[in-house]
Image (spheres, helix red, strand yellow):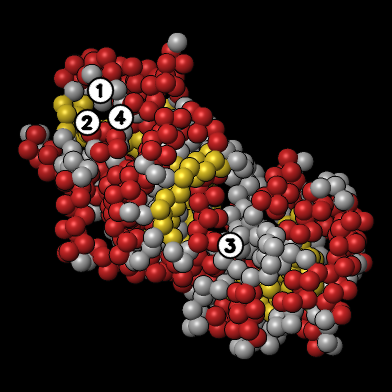
Amino acid sequence: MSASLADEGLVIPDAPTEPGEFEHSLRSLRDSGRKLLVAYVTGGLHDEWPDVVRAVADAGADAIEIGIPFSDPVMDGPIIQEASELALHDGASPVTVLDTLRTIDAGVPLAVMTYYNLAFHMGHERFASSLYEAGVRAAILPDLPLEEVGPWARAADPAGIETVMLAAPTAPDERLPRVVARSRGFVYAVGLLGVTGERDALAASSLVIARRLKAITDKPVLVGVGVSNAQQAAEVSQVADGCVIGSALMRRVVAGEGPAGAGAFIAEVRAALDAS
Amino acid sequence: MSLSEPSASGRFGEFGGRYVPETLVPACQELEAAFRDAWADQSFRDELDALLADYAGRPSPITECHRLSEELGVRVLLKREDLNHTGSHKINNVLGQALLAKRMGKTRLVAETGAGQHGVASATAAALMGMECKVFMGEVDMERQALNVFRMKLLGAEVVPAMSGSRTLKDAVNEAMRDWVGTVENTHYCLGSVMGPHPYPWMVREFHTVIGKESREQCAKLLENEIPDVVTACVGGGSNAIGIFSGFADTTAELVGVEPAGGAAVGRGVPGVVHGMKSYLMQDEFGQVQEAHSISAGLDYPGVGPEHSHLSSIGRARYEQVTDAEVIEAFQLLSRTEGIIPALEPAHALAWVIRDRAKLAGKTVLLNMSGRGDKDVAQMMEILG
């Protein structure tokens, strides 16, 4: 066993210095004074999911995260677990989600959010090129932390897929700059200690992590996990460049509110961000 | 070879690693440093050894199975982990982790459990050390192991059903990890097998090396050749197996892990990543983790500890599969011939010995009797009518 293979996780390639397409788009909007809104939609959930994606884009999302459902989503709370299980039950797979995505012209940049095993199983190069061909420009893999990102990043970077890193409240000060340096697209600030899902109030830790990150990077800093409504989105975006909304949106979709309900909710969040 | 420390990134060969949400990375690093420090500290070792002796009842004996051996034509020795306090090998690891958690200033344990043996052991250690304990258990397993659920509650633990996915061990691990993501500041995740993110596969192995160490010394006195021909144990995550293997990895003994046919990660899986580790994993064509199906809740797991994947890939251990029907037969045979009712988990290892008795004829087999069968009696009563 060669040392390099045994310790593949320890070798982390530097991120390309030039922002990719996804990051470039978010930076331009941010620099124009707009607060950024990224919406999460579970791919393959009900036949209408492409319409949900379009409705959310039309309602003012600046980018969309497409969830490729995974059997064991450890970073997700009850809503996204349920959405993922329903989609898997309906036959969703990385192939069906990406095939459908190819046919959706959302008009905003697309990312995928999924778990590492789906990329590992398909093969890093093949997974990265499949994403690119489907129009995706960024990937969020919440169970692939900095120390393990090397093999994936070596395939994703040259394929034009920007790997978004998560920055958590538990990270010591010496760790955050390394996470930020490797993050592309934007920096995903984890708003609280916990998994995705709605909370009654915005966690104080959301503002703390946003402040810590804004102090060390000019990459877009978006807070996700626990940002649950328009008011919380506006509150956190006083410090951050914007936010990611997932569970609050998917709760409405799972409940059957459809593209119209999804669009109405995102429009409400957009309005609050624009007014803030 | 003896079993070595994993690489700096927590790998055994290509397997292992630390595939966890960013929130948990500092906690895993802190745990690794704390374990390294404690394991090198004689006072920690002494405290743990005292607990293992005075509380858990170690050393556990080796029992020579005269009547069974005669029936099979194979000399069978049992390492009696079933005689430990709480009825299985799980107590070795749990006492170590609880002591370590206390040393780290944690006040709360969270654990997953399949058959309930690790949950009971965790609840026991928490009671002993005055810590809070929350155990996640698949809803399906709570039904088939109702007795252990009640034991955990008696011991003061909170038992929470895992309702997602297959509602078995795999999902209990997911729920425990989700809980830990939210409570990491005051909570230690007391993982029950040689799986999960680094340092767990290594740390849990180290806490179970006591099984192998004792067995090696006992065999040296008991056997003319000092070393058995074969060392065997059941494998779900693989903690009892790695514990006993560790005592014989540097000998000529053949090491054989026995998996349930319905949860044979090494036998039927391909490399994958789940629950913080890269290891053999039963998954579909897209990499979705498949549900395991076994009569034994403790082995109902689609993955396996990374060191087993490594030992298999380098050929130092091999892994066999047995069916539920073979296990039921082994369960009854040991009860009848030796007066020892085994847990369904180690009955897997015995089922392999029974099936391969012609190949094993005349050999000496050391089998890790990892737990006692009391918990399975109600389930077997239904099956055997």
The residue that label 3 is drawn on is: A194
Q: Residues within 10 Å of mark 1 (few under 14, many from 20)?
A: some
Q: Nearer the viewer, mark 3 or mark 1?
A: 3
Taking depth in this image into account, of B66 and B102 the one nearest to the observer is B102
The residue that label 2 is drawn on is: B78
Which dot marks residue A152? Answer: none
Q: Indicate the amino acid at tag 4.
A: Arg
Taking depth in this image into account, of A101 and B295 the one nearest to the observer is B295
The reply to whether callout 4 and callout 2 are in contact (CB within 8 Å) is no
Q: Residues within 10 Å of mark 4 (few under 14, many from 20)?
A: many
Residue A22 coordinates in the image, percent (x, y): 77, 75
Q: Nearer the viewer, mark 1 or mark 2?
A: 1
Residue B384 coordinates in the image, percent (x, y): 43, 13
**Could you tell me which chain the residue with mark 4 belongs to?**
B
**Secondary structure under the numbered disc 4 in the rendered image:** loop
Q: Residue at x 21, y 55 (%)?
A: B48
Disc 3 and disc 1: Cα gap in Å?
Answer: 45 Å
**Secondary structure under the numbered disc 3 in the rendered image:** loop
Q: Residue furthest top?
A: B385
Q: Indicate the amino acid at tag 3.
A: Gly
* Pointer 3 and pointer 1 on the same chain: no
The residue that label 4 is drawn on is: B372
Report if residue A132 is visible in the image: no
Residue B278 coordinates in the image, percent (x, y): 49, 55
Disc 4 and disc 1: Cα gap in Å?
Answer: 8 Å
* Pointer 1 and pointer 2 on the same chain: yes
Q: Residue at x 74, y 71 (%)?
A: A232
The reply to whether callout 4 and callout 1 are in contact (CB within 8 Å) is yes
Disc 4 and disc 2: Cα gap in Å?
Answer: 12 Å
The residue that label 1 is drawn on is: B340
Q: Nearer the viewer, mark 4 or mark 2?
A: 4
